[in-house]
Amino acid sequence: MAGEKTDSGVPRVVAIAWGAHAVPQRGPSRGLSHEKIVRRAIEIADEHGLGAVTMQRVAESLGFTTMSLYRYVANKEELLLLMCGADWLLPPREESGDDWRENLRHWVAELRSMYRQHPWLLEVQRGPVSVLLPGTMEVVDRGMEAVRALELSEQEIISLVLVVSSYVGSFSGLERDLAEQEDLEFGPEAMAELGEVITAERLPYAAPFFLAGNYAGGPVLEEESGVDMEYEFGLELLIEGLAARQAARKRD
């Protein structure tokens, strides 16, 4: 989804996002700007979802024609990239300390907060262009700062940032999906019916877990709803794994 490029070969959307692309000089552009367009599109997505974002709707909500909008943004794909590339979607940056574990937890908390406030971000396709946008690079920079005390190569640091940010994104997507659905709670008859096909002979480990009400359909407990417990468990595994890796390197 690279789209048009500048004369130097930089994707046009990247140049626009960084403010390095010239604003159109001809036509009825008074009061219109890339920033206003992106901010309004984000407001629509936050309130109504990504599907509600159309070039026509954004233009009309700003008091302009759709053709006026096209002078600034080539198409909807470019608009979506500009939206997810806005660096102000993240909370204000804070100075980090020397404890990499605390820094890492703070960084992932920022990411999770961003996805909760702007869940449509999880629907925008990522690729080689999106990683060059200000918002994405701000996420990477904060991640690199968080783990700066670890003894890792540059490639390992980038890989770590990708792994952790993907972990947060995956759980944020699951959390969003679950929030849109009702919890299942099966009574004795439903459990008995499913127990005829979900058997220990077929699934020796998962079936007993399910039949005990610990998989899906069991009693819904308010304090255990959502995926917070699983999210924290996985994050702790990542942190413990990094700590063990560092300890092993120091011994070597």
Image: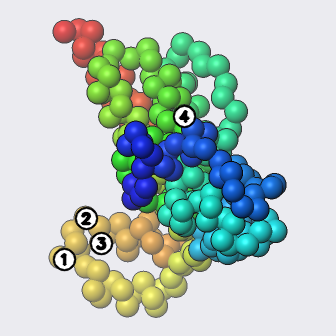
Task: Say above or below: 115 vs 27.
Answer: above
Q: Position of residue 178 (x, y in %)?
A: 55, 68
Q: Residue furthest front?
A: 26
| Quadrant (top left, top right, bottom left, bottom right) of the C terminus | top left
Q: Earlier in the sequence, mark 1 or mark 4?
A: 4
Q: CA distance from mark 2 to mark 1?
A: 9 Å
| Tags 3 and 2 touching, CB below 8 Å | yes
Residue drawn at x 65%, y 48% is: 23
Q: CA distance from mark 3 to mark 1?
A: 8 Å
Residue drawn at x 38%, y 43% is: 9
Q: What residue sits right under mark 3 in the picture?
A: 207
Q: Earlier in the sequence, mark 3 or mark 1?
A: 1
Residue drawn at x 72%, y 61% is: 27
When asked about the image quadrant of residue 1, the answer is bottom left
Given residues 190 and 43, the one toward you in this image is: 43
Q: Amino acid at mark 3?
A: Ala
Q: CA distance from mark 3 to mark 2?
A: 6 Å
Q: CA distance from mark 1 to mark 4?
A: 48 Å
Category of crowding for the residue at label 2, using alpha-carbon neighbours closer than 10 angstroms: few (below 14), some (14–19), many (at least 20): few
Q: What residue sits right under mark 1 in the picture?
A: 202
Q: Secondary structure at mark 2?
A: loop
Q: Earlier in the sequence, mark 4 or mark 3?
A: 4
| Tags 4 and 3 touching, CB below 8 Å | no
Q: Amino acid at mark 4?
A: Glu
Q: What residue sits right under mark 2 in the picture?
A: 205
